[in-house]
Structure formats: structure tokens, C-alpha cells
Amino acid sequence: MKKISDIAKISLEGMEFFANHGYYDEEQKIGNKFGVDVSIMVDVYKAEESDSLSQTVNYEKLYTIVKEEMIKPSRLLENIGNRIIQRVFDAFSKVNTVEVTVSKFNPPVGGICKRAKIHLKRER
């Protein structure tokens, strides 16, 4: 019998954090504002039928994962994004794909730049 599935994209967009990330020591001391967007692909067929949170991804738990990873200082945005992806896969066995964008507001590039950002995408 063919398995019924309904893959959905679930996203948390526009999360903002003040954190101590940066390549330069001074950035890690004074901190900066960062933005994070996370999207996941997950089979929600059982959640659609049951109306049960246990059959999908809890947004509050997803937010908590991002918040906890943003607290840990990193030199590179890539490192933050990678840690978020690994934690999401560890926390939610039903998740097939994770996409993360991490932005640093007003990066120290020697000129006007609103944001520097990285976008990572991984599939299980």
C-alpha cells in the first residue's frame, strides 16, 4: 500500500536577536543585532488528519532551538547556521529539509551595508 504524505514548508521568519558573534574580538565583546529565518519541510499528513501538535513541528520548540544557538558565541555565520540545522534534525525526526538564513545587521565592512547573510540548506 502506498504511504500517503503531504509535505509542507513551515517557516519562522524575521526572528531577531542581540548576540556576541563576529570574526573580530571586538564584535564578540560589544555584540550586534542578528536576524534568523528558518524553514523546514515536513510530512504533515497525520497532523492534518488528527489536529495534533505531536504530529508536526512545534513552532515554540523550533524558536527555542534558534534562541539557544544564538546565545553561543561564534566567529562565523556559517557556524551558527550549521548548529541550528543539526539541532533541528536532532529534535524533529519527521523533518526532511532545513533551510536557515542568518543575517548580521550593519557588518563591519568599511562602508554602508545593511546586512551580511548566509543561507544554508540541508536534506536528510
Image (spheres, rainbow, N blue to C red):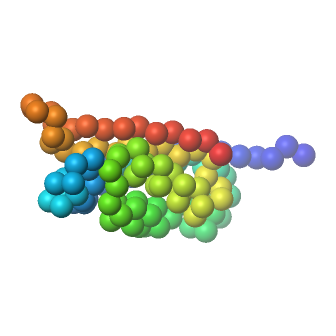
In the foreground, 94 or 1? 94
Percent x, y of residue 43: 64, 50
The residue under the point 34% across, 55% down is 74
* Above-or-below relation of 43 to 56: above
Q: Is residue 2 visible?
A: yes
The residue under the point 18% across, 61% down is 29
The residue under the point 58% across, 64% down is 91
Say which quadrant the C terminus sits in.
Answer: top right
Residue reaching furthest right?
Answer: 1
In the foreground, 20 or 13? 20
* Above-or-below relation of 90 to 118: below
* Above-or-below relation of 3 to 48: above
User: Residue 90's quadrant in the figure?
Assistant: bottom right
Q: Please give left or right for residue 35 compared with residue 95 in the image.
A: left
Q: Is residue 39 visible?
A: no
Percent x, y of residue 44: 62, 53
Q: Please give left or right for residue 107 compared with residue 44 in the image.
A: left
